[in-house]
Image: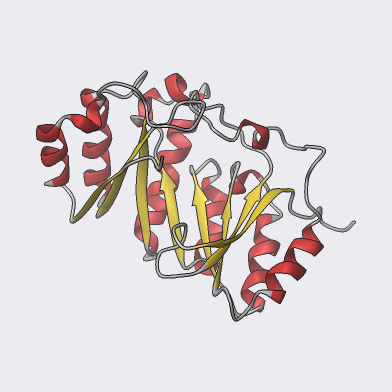
């Protein structure tokens, strides 16, 4: 029986921000086992959708852009929700393109299998690992994310860890807890991302990101620290 093709919910043909140092196409994988309260792509959460793109057609479009792009990012949704990701990554690499992954680390074993094929990983830490249920509605996701991050940190593959600061759940204490855990793992690059409202503008009012003393405190823990504001 043939393997099922990768389920794809959308494609961004050109991106300069999703894969450091590369002009890349972004493939948005359909399906995510998490249900984050601030999710801005809820249409990508179900495992299937009416508007999914044909896998072979997406690969053909990527192949036609070689020379304009030099990489492909698998994002989501959650790419690790699909075993078909392995074959998809292999086929992109066979085109001579670099490959990046955006993930929340929901499947540690699959991530470990993929790491030798990846050039960069953007890893989303949603909350303190013991408190994932409050943000993702999936309590076991915290343990899986922790294990995945430990595997990634030991792999030698370049990566960044980023946390979206959802004001309803992530205050200064939560950010300190996340930063402490990342420091213990050996993370060197940590990015805090500004959460957006449902209409995709910056969250109203002050958040933990506006606490300059806290940002300085957290920044001192990492070799590379960034606060990434929402684009208006």
Q: Which x, y percent locates residue 76? A: 59, 45
User: In which quadrant of the rendered image does the N terminus lie?
Assistant: bottom right
> Where's the C terminus, which quadrant?
top left
Q: Depth check: 14 or 114 in front?
A: 14
Which quadrant holds residue 74? bottom right
Q: Can residue 216 be seen in the rendering of this structure?
A: yes
Colour scheme in use: secondary structure
Q: Residue furthest right?
A: 1
Residue 61 is left or right of residue 131, and the answer is right
Q: Is residue 74 left or right of residue 216?
A: right
**Residue 47 in the image: above or below residue 79:** above
Residue depicted at 16% across the width and 38% down the height = 215
Q: Residue at x 60, y 81 (%)?
A: 67
The percent position of residue 211, horizontal first and vertical second, equals: 16, 30
Picture coordinates of residue 200 (x, y %)? 48, 33
**Nearer the observer, 96 or 131:** 96
Looking at the image, which residue is at 21% across and 37% down? 180
Q: Relative to 160, does residue 137 appear above or below in the rendering?
A: above
| 76 to 126, vertically: above or below | below
Q: Residue at x 46, y 63 (%)?
A: 16
């Amino acid at each position: 029986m043939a393997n099922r093709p990768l389920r794809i919910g959308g494609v961004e043909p050109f991106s300069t921000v999703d894969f450091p140092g590369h002009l890349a196409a972004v493939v948005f994988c359909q399906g995510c086992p998490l249900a984050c309260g601030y999710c801005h792509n809820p249409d990508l959460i179900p495992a299937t959708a009416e508007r999914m793109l044909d896998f072979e057609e997406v690969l053909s479009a990527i192949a036609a852009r070689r020379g304009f792009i030099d990489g492909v990012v698998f994002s989501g949704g959650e790419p690790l929700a699909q075993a078909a990701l392995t074959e998809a990554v292999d086929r992109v690499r066979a085109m001579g393109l670099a490959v990046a992954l955006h993930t929340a680390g929901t499947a540690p074993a699959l991530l470990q299998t993929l790491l030798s094929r990846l050039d960069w990983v953007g890893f989303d830490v949603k909350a303190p690992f013991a408190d994932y249920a409050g943000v993702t509605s999936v309590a076991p996701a915290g343990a899986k994310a922790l294990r995945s991050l430990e595997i990634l940190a030991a792999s030698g593959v370049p990566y960044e860890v980023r946390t979206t600061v959802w004001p309803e759940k992530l205050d200064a204490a939560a950010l300190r807890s996340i930063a402490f855990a990342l420091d213990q793992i050996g993370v060197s690059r940590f990015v805090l991302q500004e959460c957006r409202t449902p209409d995709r503008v910056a969250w109203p009012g002050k958040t933990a990101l506006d606490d300059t003393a806290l940002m300085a405190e957290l920044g001192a823990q990492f070799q590379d620290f960034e606060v990434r504001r929402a684009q208006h």
